[in-house]
Amino acid sequence: MTFDLRLIAYSPFGGRLGVLPHPLSVEAGWPLNDVPSLKVAYTTTAVGADLLDQPCEIAVQWSVDGNTWTEAPDSRFLRIKRRGDGSDPTGLTTFDLPGFVWMLRKIVLYPGVAPLVSGKRAFLSATAGAILQTFISEAKGRGAVPGLNWDFTPTHDSAGQAWNKVLTIYYQPGMDALTALQNLAEQGVCDYRVSGRTVQVFNTDTEMQRDLSSGPGPVDLRYGRDIAEAPDDGTLEDVASSVLVVGDNGLVKTLSNAAAVQPWGPWEQYIGAGGVSDEGTATLLADSALERAGSERVQRTRGIVLYGGRWLPLKDYRPGDQVLAPGDGGGLEPLRVRQVTLARNSTGVIGGSLVLNDRFLERDIRLARRTAGIVGGSTADGGSGARPVPAPEAPEPRTPAAPQGLIVNPLAYLDEHGFPHGQVTVTWGAVTSDVGGVALNVGGYELFMRINETGQPWFLVASTEPSDTTATYSPLVIGESYAFKVRAINVGKAGPFSSQVAVTIPDDTDAPPVPTAPQLSARLGVVRVTWNGLGVGSVPMPSDFLHVRVWMQDPLAPGWSEIGVLGEAGSILVPNLPYGSDRQFRFTSIDRSGNESSPSSAATIAAVQLVTGDAANESITTGALAANAVTADKIDAGAVEAQHITAGAVVADKLAAVLTLSTRVVAGNASGARVELNSSGLVAFNGSGQQTVSISAASGAVSIVGQLASGVTGARVVVNPAGATNPEIRFIPGSGTNQSRIYSDGSRYTGEATLVMESGTNQAATAMCRLIHAAGFWQAAILNPSNGESRGGYVSAVEQQASIGFLHPTQEDQYLVFDPSGTFHRGTWQYTSSDSGLIMLEVTITGNGTYQVVNLGYTMATVPKCVWSAQTTAPGPAPTDLYIHSRTQSTLFFRTATAPSSTLLIALWAWR
């Protein structure tokens, strides 16, 4: 199989001109989500040189048999740049040709028919297909790029899949389509390529990220066969072990990564997060930065073999695919092809190389995209910070129009304790006019949120400046559905709300790292399976790591079964395995959200027999020993034990008055289950030879491995009871088994022991109490003993928050949350026959005797409706003749004859 390349010339947007058979050299590069390039050297005396005299298109084709030729994606180039020397008798000319996608640079955005926003054209709630089709179709309508095609639509990508992302974005007229396309790709909105003259755009990491590294026939690029050399370029320039995030409203947050590379001690990094004022969003930004800056970044270049290689570029794999290739240590690992480069020299010999990204660099790219989405919302670099068109203000406040293009992007993040929470980044289009269409400068925006259930109240969660059409908010509950809406404010006058957008907060979906391979040893018929606590590549486990699952199978009868778990670095013992029979072991890691990693590499071992060779059990008897064959100098110290001495053989006159112990006294098996008295003290061992009890003769210290009980029956205390997963103390009542316990759980927070206290259950077995003490978390709650769900009162506290209330899986939650920003209540305020309950509102008033009406959104009881009091919040002074009354059970009327200097914001409190 001979791999070869050839060049075919085409007229611009036209038919085939012919083959370019004699290039002196050819070098082509196919990067992922970038402009391909082609360099060709040709002499004017060579056949076909005349085809290059005028602008044309050059297609690079590949073949493995010299008969069938294929043009791969992104293999059409534009002959637009040449270089030659008229004094050169050979007529050598070099051509630098960009890929066909470069032609998008010659498509620019026109203003369009809709009004511009601060000189920019708005795309509201638009897909990548809608944006790019607008660029191309409008250009073709003006007569530009007549032969350029596309196969995506505003609703579906080039693979026929519905677009999975929308965005609200502003572009300056004059921006070219290529810049817009690359900007969308950098934000993780799409991937792109060109097939012939057809632009193809896909949902990110779908069609252009084929997984060829797994399955029955993976693409495995091996040294000597497919790979000739493997240089790596590494840098520590971007390493940091701590990051400082500074946001708005005094938000300052610092996070550290103790596992980061620190050859010169801690290095620091700074993130300015304008517009971010909640800790969840700051945590997302900091975590993303720390993960990207935690270790050396390495670019892997792999020289490829094209003569005799099993796997060939363009034919078997292409940019974007994931393949198996030699990694840092030389072993095969999944790597993503980021660029393919092929070169053909003057003798016709073809060579090439690959640029590969490991899973860490690919994760860096995803994290960078996520960070860009948080910091800039869904607004690209070409259109962020749009300001409305200035216009003279009318003497009275006018009502702003409703915002359009509301987009809510939910994400999951982990707090400092490793628990997942939700965060949203919300973006909308700028409001530039009032409800009548007259130009208007709005004073800002208000974002409201509620649980997406009928009757749930709306809460104001963010207010932004006039130029800021993005807001973030956290923490939110994983799996909960929330609705959002936004409105514009003009001199205190609120406009109508935008359409509502509801999203469900996703759970964390990132699986923990693949654990390192098991380390195995066999002794005394028992196999020890050990894990070093790290992921492949010495990667530490994340903060939400739960445990490693230990799996075993018989390779002759495949079928993996779980045999135990490890919450941290350590070992488990596997007894009762058949001697001499191989067993395979492997690990998977799992986090608190249930995400499980791929299996680790497997390791194989066989349990070994305690006694090997010809001396089988009971094969040596007294008849096989000569008289006096066993003498004192042939008996090892400690070899003669109690069962070897005839009853009554040792009597008082054979013992000294004081017995001096020079070695040891053993009761039981000398190498198995036994009690032993030696010069260090008293010790006991189990059947595996593991020491279980130690009483030191020197210090009197007592160490016990296993269960310690204050009694066998009745009321008793049991320390480290048999079968317990964690260190534990159980308190058992005088009768029955309804016990309470205290235990230490090391799986909740990495490197930290959490103290948990649990009561017994009630008589109906429907409730129990659990009290949790951790370094940054405390909670007392009533739970369902069958499944651990909350079913009653609870109190919890963390460093920046406390809450108290009632939680239940099938009943409405009722609780209060306290944090530095204020108090939040979820649930229903009840009132008794004396009509008690709390109501809070904020309303605006313009004065001059005008009635203001507030729709409460609920119906009050008839008598009494409410007893109100009011307080001016901004600006002042407060009116002295504020009248409040209600004509219906769901509305409130108020007015003042005083004409304030500006609109007043009034806080109303009612108790009923």
Image (cartoon, helix red, strand yellow):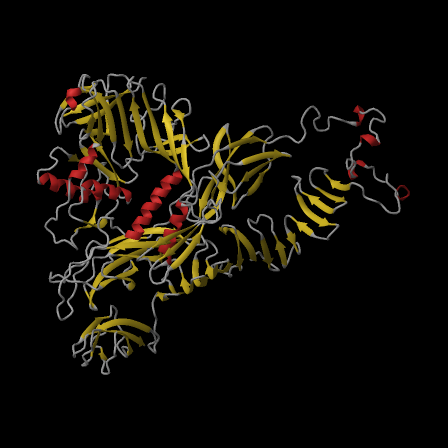
The image quadrant of residue 59 is top left
Q: Work out whether residue 214 can be spotted.
A: no
**Number of numbered discs visible in the structure rendering:** 0
Q: In this orientation, which residue lies closer to the viewer: 46 or 303?
A: 46
Q: Position of residue 707 (x, y in %)?
A: 63, 50
- For the C terminus, the image quarter is bottom left
Q: In this orientation, which residue lies closer to the viewer: 343 or 388?
A: 343
- For the N terminus, the image quarter is top left
Q: In this orientation, which residue lies closer to the viewer: 890 or 702?
A: 702
Q: Position of residue 535 (x, y in %)?
A: 47, 40
Q: Position of residue 633 (x, y in %)?
A: 82, 31
Residue 868 sits above or below residue 580 on the image: below
Query: Please, which residue is most extreme toward the right here?
Result: 653
Query: Please, which residue is most extreme toward the front here?
Result: 87
The image quadrant of residue 597 is top left
119 horizontally vs 698: left or right? left
Q: Position of residue 319 (x, y in %)?
A: 30, 32
The residue lying at 13 percent from left, 29 percent from top is 12
323 horizontally vs 549: left or right? left
544 horizontally vs 107: left or right? right
Q: Work out whether residue 133 can be spotted.
A: yes
The residue lying at 26 percent from left, 69 percent from top is 858
